[in-house]
Amino acid sequence: MNVADSELVMTILKQNGFDRAENIETADVILFNTCSVRQHAEERVLGRINNEMRHKSLKDVKIGVIGCMAQRLGTELADLSRGVDFVVGVDQYDKLPEIIRSSFREEFLSYTDVDNEQLYPAIIPQHQDNLKAFITIMRGCNNFCSYCIVPYTRGRERSRSPLEIIEDVKKAGEQGLREIMLLGQNVNSYSYEEINFPQLLRMVNEIPSIKRIRFTTSHPKDLSDELIETMADTDKVCEHFHLAMQSGDNEILKRMNRGYTAEHYYDLTVKLRQAIPEIAITTDVIAGFPGETEEQFQRTYDIMQKIEFDHAYMFKYSSRSGTRAAEFLDQVPEEIRLERLQRLIKQQEVITTRKYKNAIGSVREIYVENISRRSQEEVSGKTRDFKVTVFPGDSQLIGKFVNVKIVEAAGWTLKGKLLK
Ligand code: SF4
């Protein structure tokens, strides 16, 4: 989502006479687009700002912070880092050109008003990637999961008009981008007049220049049968579903304010696999949420074993000030959070390895994206079910869809052989 927002900001700036510097040394303005979802992300931004302060001693460079951290901290950022010249929240990007110009005349500036209607209409972002486009379909979130800062930084849920989305997708297709990722905090609750998310998917599926459609993020409480049916019968929607589970214990899910039970979540994975047998399901899980007992943790551990996710993003609980969970008195000690996280990771590694090995012998369509990081004689891309695959080939294959026979699974990467 930050990539999509960076593209939006870049487009706004370009339309107003700014351009991207060739490198940081030649830049007059350095913008940090930030994430607040975990404490660690914010700490890293402060570290990066300090690193870039050296440019200020060489010339008059302005440093701006945008994104969720700017929204959350506002003027506090001036105290946390003396290098920051301006902060701009997520709903104020259209004022950035003016703010940047003012920053060369005025002291610290902060623009963080929340605008629950802000959708940046009429701005079709220029996508920076040559192969894939991240396309925002909605902004904000209404769910208020008790651990999450997003509803406070990104405001209330609002959906972009399908006409604008389609225009954005068509433009991406004209630029030669063949894969699109539809983005929102909770795409399942996309709603614009009569159009819901499955209907939007069907509309996007009709655009001839697009070959693959992905989306994220989905909330289990809003995943409908209609969406599963739509996925099953639209040829371009890829066989991958990222469905954040967070916990396998009902009491913890309730304290997280997630709005579903572990049983409901499990049933959704069964339905998805029945409707789309080749689907890969991935998830997010939090270990050591406040009050989590060993027994409750064990339920998460067990359900992960039962579901067998293809991959999971696992985190130890990170307390975010301003959220309800940060106020809970029964915080789990750091070492227990870490120890539980390690147990989850260990188990998931075994499952992921098994899943990846199951792919050996199959033929997969790969959208070739890069030269492999490990070897100049290999290229890498992804399967429709979102698995990185590496195989011998050269740069001429980049941007092509090819069939590859999987011959090996090495960690979380598949290795294959190009079929002629
Ligand atoms: S659905 Fe929950 S976790 Fe996701 S952004 Fe909204 S509040 Fe945060």
Image: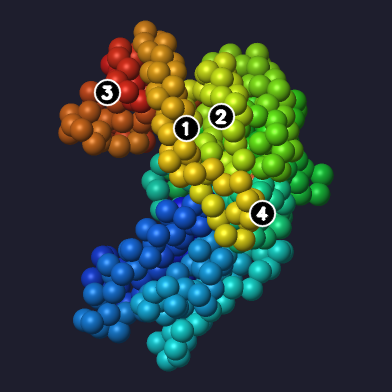
Label number found at residue 324: 4
- Secondary structure of the residue carrying numbered label 4: loop
- Above or below residue 37? Residue 62 is below
For marks 2 and 1 on the same chain, the one whose residue lies earlier in the sequence: 2
The picture quadrant where one finds residue 53 is bottom left
Front: mark 1 or 3: 1
Q: Does mark 4's beta carbon lie closer than 8 Å to ligand 1?
A: no
Mark 3 crowd level (few <14, some 14–19, many ≥20, 10 Å Cα): many
Location of mark 1 (residue)? 340
Counting residues from the start of the chain, the first of labels 1 and 3 encountered is: 1
**Disc 3 target residue:** 391
Q: Secondary structure at mark 3?
A: strand
- Identified at 40% across, 68% down, the residue is 31
Q: Amino acid at mark 2?
A: Glu
Residue 145 seen in render: yes
- Front-most of 20 and 54? 54
- The disc at residue 269 is none
Q: In this rendering, which labeled residue sits more in front, label 3 or label 4?
A: 4
